[in-house]
Image (cartoon, rainbow, N blue to C red):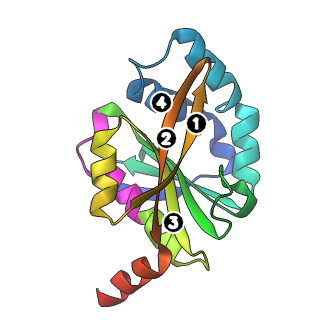
Amino acid sequence: MKTGIIKIGASDVKTLRDLAMRTFSETFCNEYTDEEFKTYFDTALSETTLRQELSDPESQHYFVTVDGKPVGFLKVNIGSAQTEQELPTGFEVQRIYVLADNQGMGLGKVLFEKALQLAAETACDYVWLGVWEHNYKSQKFYAKYGFEKFSEHTFIVGDSHDTDWLLRRSVASIREEAAKQ
């Protein structure tokens, strides 16, 4: 089994959309109704929206692959592309998803460490992300990387309004850690 990370381009929009819808459905299958999924897919994950995001110079997207097949993806943002503007010099890790069949292989960790590497290459002060308040496994994972809660925001899927915790870590601490290795 060979894994890799490849940058997503405009020609990959259909693959990205299919993967995004599948991973989101798998992750939240017990949380939302079919109608809420449809609304979210038709807005946040529409081809038009994803094409706009892929063309935004303040966003980057990557696939994680297994034997050349995309099985997960990462989306990061800076500047005005960030979903929240509480940290104007922030680097947002907006999306990390891996197909259920490929979880437990360390691919989420690979994508997350790619995000941290990208953050360290910027002039940003903080790297941050949102995590659902009931996603204890992910909260524990991010805490191991030194992330701490600094705020909350509402994540809307159809008629559902969920609370996401906003977690951050200083980019300087990531650079210092990398320099020691």
Q: Is residue 93 above or below residue 73?
A: below
Task: Estimate the x, y position of residue 11 in percent, counting from the top left.
Answer: 68, 45
Q: CA distance from mark 2 to mark 3?
A: 16 Å
Residue 27, quarter of picture: top left
- Report the side of 90 relative to 65 (left or right): right
Dot 3: element: strand
Magenta stretch: includes residue 99? no
Dot 4: element: helix
Residue 2 seen anywhere in this rendered image of the structure: no
Specify the segment rendered in magenta.
101-113
Who comes first in sequence, dot 3 or dot 1? Answer: 3
Q: Nearer the viewer, residue 89 or 55?
A: 89
Nearest to the eye among marks 4 and 3: give it: 3
- Do the CB atoms of the residues marked 3 and 1 lie less than 8 Å apart? no
- Report the side of 55 relative to 166 (left or right): right
The kind of residue on which mark 2 rests is: Asp
Magenta stretch: includes residue 111? yes
Who comes first in sequence, dot 2 or dot 4? Answer: 4
Q: CA distance from mark 3 to mark 1?
A: 19 Å
User: What residue would you read off at disc 1?
Assistant: 154
Who comes first in sequence, dot 4 or dot 3? Answer: 4
Q: Main secondary structure of the magenta part?
A: helix
Which circle marks residue 164 in the picture?
Answer: 2
The kind of residue on which mark 4 rests is: Phe
Q: Residue at x 34, y 66 (%)?
A: 146
- Do the CB atoms of the residues marked 1 and 2 lie less than 8 Å apart? yes
Q: CA distance from mark 1 to mark 4?
A: 17 Å
Number of numbered discs visible in the structure rendering: 4
Nearest to the eye among marks 1 and 4: give it: 1
Q: Residue at x 24, y 47 (%)?
A: 105
User: What residue would you read off at disc 3?
Assistant: 127
